[in-house]
Amino acid sequence: MADSAGQAEEQVLELDDIQGTLLRLRPTPFTGAYFLLRIDDPDDGRQMLARLVPHVASATQWWDPPNRAWLSVALSYSGLRALGVPQESLDSFPDAFCEGMAARAERLGDTGDSSPEHWDAPLGSADVHVAVSVFAPDATAMESLLETARETLRDLPGVSVIYRLDASALPTKRTHLGFVDGIGEPDIEGSGVASLAQRMGGGDYGYLPGFGPTIKAGEFLLGYANEMGRITLMPQPDVLSRNGTYVAFRKLHLRVAEYRRYLKDNASSPEEEELLAAKMVGRWPSGAPLVLAPDHDEPAIATDPHRVNDFTYHEQDPAGLRCPLGAHIRRMNPRDALADSLVDVKLHRALRRGTPYGPMLPEGELDDDGAERGIVFIFMGTDLVRQFEFLKTQWANDGDFVGLGDEKDPIVGSNDGTGTFTIPKRPVRRRLQQLPRFAVTKGGEYLFMPSIRALKWIAERDT
Amino acid sequence: MTANTQTPSRPGLKEGKTNEFTLFFNVKPGHAQQIRDFFKGVDHDKRRVLTDRIGTLHDLRWVLFDDDTRLLFASNFDGNWDAYIDDFAALIPDTFDAVLQHTEDYPGIKDPSIKDFVVAHQATACNYLRAAPDATVKDIQKALRVNKAFQQLLDEAG
């Protein structure tokens, strides 16, 4: 409970220095793309950055960025090096970031089909230096910003675009698996929560039921106090790290046809298929949570910002009779579910952005058409190990924390066809068998998303 | 025959789902009695509630040795010890500080360098064997609950 003294000291964030994508959700619908760049010449790289910086959206201009489109920049460890950031500075970054996601694949469950040797080039390689994301509300605004981005590369042979992945909202405004997502976002102190639900409710700021507890800004931004009462280790110098954060970028291929067949094979009617899918996710396709709508989808709850997140587990559904203990949203944000365990859930929150890529599999289609489709998953936070990797290793790819043994997240877990999914039920629980892996990792990177001031600092360095 | 595995970049051996976790500390001169006194004052039942909440701790022991100059902490954990150390620091800091403040170089459980301190004091076992390597604390607790209910059912049926 925040006391009045705590409220009086409410954190003030330097919104004009923080990249917009960190604290603000993009408007929908949107069209977007991710670009990966390799820098072969540090001077050219810094020149490119200098040209790019004025176009990077801050958290203040988010709602009215130049050209109604916006751009974000993040750098890998090898990218910082390629840009000429000094060695003593590189050495001050945490090990996980320096090693990169590919080196930590095994602990993340990226094995078998998901292991780095099967990733899409150049993901996971030392060639990935700079990641740029570009988003706009429509194709015209997008093209205009892309033109600007192309200009930043003009006459710079030492910078190459080595990868492009288009990622846009689907016509349904849902994921490839048919769900509205991005609903349960943390309430970050001082940021002004701008969740999907709030925008559906017509406002961008303010507290809404179920978003709590408010999380210290230092969990998501370097340079501010975190939930452990201190400032997360800051890479040096401070100007480089302050107002920045780490990013886990993942390209996840979704096996949509297999997912649909699995539901069909384990259900006796379309209604039961939908219930099964909802049990796996923890919400209905509309976003209505199972704890509040246990028997059938209630879109009216999903569109009511005061209700869509206003639920608890320990209090309202301790045995998981509504939302199973192993459901995706209950794992990724357990709320009060672990109240009896020695776990501080505030230390393990994630800022997430999911963006679909690839064409939709036509509704009802049960055969794979071979198309590449999935989700670009973005995690942001100041501690890759305590946040992102903890979520993957303890909550997504294990079940022991809720007494489910080896059972993994049914949607994003590293399943291999031998796993189970337990649905609590009276008098007898139901257990689905032979759970396949629906989300296959096609690549990933640990990145550092610097503040706008830090981008300028890097760009202006002279080596 | 399977060998114990050592988790990359972490000390300690793993058998099945459980890790051995063995730490050696140098006791501050003359502080051994304070450690003994602390444990005399500990409420055993309260400690059990705590280990239940931790949910991954099979057992633990503290041993003063070498004429009270050294302290051993030996324990068995499901999963990796460092996954939850920040949670312990946030929720039960006193438990660790109460004992370890009497050892040399201890920075405090809330210090950012605590993980390095732990690793520096950890020694990896030469060999590690468990009777039921695949049973976690949670599994065992659940099995006991189920058995109790089952025996009750048999009692009532009889």
Image (cartoon, coloured by chain):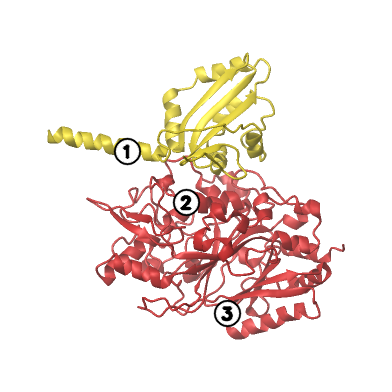
Secondary structure state at the residue bearing disc 2 = helix
Check disc 1 and report the residue beneath it.
Answer: B143
**A34 lies above or below A339:** below
Location of residue A44 with respect to A226 vertically, above or below: below
Which residue is pictured at 72% across the width and 61% down the height?
Answer: A78
Secondary structure under tag 3 reads: loop
State which chain disc 1 sits on.
B
Give the amino acid type for the residue marked by disc 1 in the picture: Ala
Query: What is the distance, in whole Å, between disc 2 and disc 1 at their CAs?
Result: 22 Å
Q: Residues within 10 Å of mark 1 (few under 14, many from 20)?
A: few
Chain A image colour = red
Image point (46%, 67%), residue name? A181
Residue designated by label 2 = A395
Mark whose residue sits in front, 3 or 2 = 2
Going 50% across and 60% down the picture, which residue do you hit? A112
Outermost residue toward the left in this view: B158
Whole-angstrom CA distance, mark 3 to mark 1, is 55 Å
Q: The residue tagged with tag 1: helix, strand or loop?
A: helix
Where does label 3 land, which residue? A137
Image: A415 above or below B91: below
Viewer-proximal residue among A363 and A32: A363
Please give the chain letter of the residue carrying mark 3. Answer: A
Which label belongs to residue A127? none
Q: Earlier in the sequence, mark 3 or mark 2?
A: 3
Mark 3 to mark 2 CA distance (whole Å): 34 Å
Task: Give chain B's shade.
Answer: yellow
Residue at the far front in the pictured view = B1
Furthest toward the right, the residue is A463
Mark 3 near mark 1, Cβ–Cβ under 8 Å? Answer: no
Q: Residues within 10 Å of mark 3 (few under 14, many from 20)?
A: some
- Tag 2 and tag 1 share a subunit: no
